[in-house]
């Protein structure tokens, strides 16, 4: 491999590690915020029973809710546009 390719691979690896470290830092901050809330005890109980970190559960719920909201509104808009075109 050329030296340019090696340099690019090193930079890509550094950037990947930077993103992973930043992601884990944000997860730690999220964990601390959740532990301060009244749901912190239930979150720890959930984590003990399922062995899944409760931050991942929260992220999953937010993603699913966002997808449902996004596609729900999108589907309603498509229906409304189609319905209006039938009337006209």
Image (cartoon, rainbow, N blue to C red):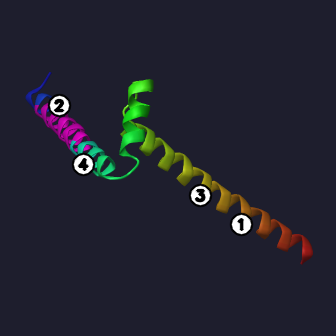
Q: Which x, y percent locates residue 8?
A: 16, 35
| Residue 11 among magenta residues | yes
Q: Quadrant of the C terminus?
A: bottom right
Q: What residue is shown with label 4?
A: 29
> Looking at the rendered structure, which numbered label has been put on residue 70?
3
| Lower sequence index among marks 1 and 2 | 2
Q: Are marks 2 and 3 in contact (CB under 8 Å)?
A: no
| Residue 29 among magenta residues | no
Q: What residue is shown with label 2?
A: 9
Prevailing secondary structure class for the magenta stretch in the rendered image: helix
Q: Comparing marks 4 and 1, which lies closer to the viewer?
A: 4
Q: Which x, y percent locates residue 32?
A: 25, 47
Relative to residue 41, is residue 74 drawn left or right?
Answer: right
Relative to residue 80, is residue 57 drawn left or right?
Answer: left
In this rendered view, identify the residue nearer to me: 24 or 18. Answer: 24
In which quarter of the view is residue 23 placed? Answer: top left
Q: Is residue 85 above or below residue 24?
A: below
């Amino acid at each position: 491999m050329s030296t340019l390719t090696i340099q690019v691979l090193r930079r890509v690896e550094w950037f990947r590690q930077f993103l992973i470290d930043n992601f884990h830092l944000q997860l730690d901050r999220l964990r601390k915020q959740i532990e301060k809330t009244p749901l912190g005890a239930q979150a720890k109980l959930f984590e003990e029973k399922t062995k899944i970190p409760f931050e991942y559960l929260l992220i999953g719920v937010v993603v699913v809710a966002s997808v449902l909201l996004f596609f729900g509104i999108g589907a309603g808009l498509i229906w409304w546009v189609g319905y209006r075109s039938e009337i006209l």
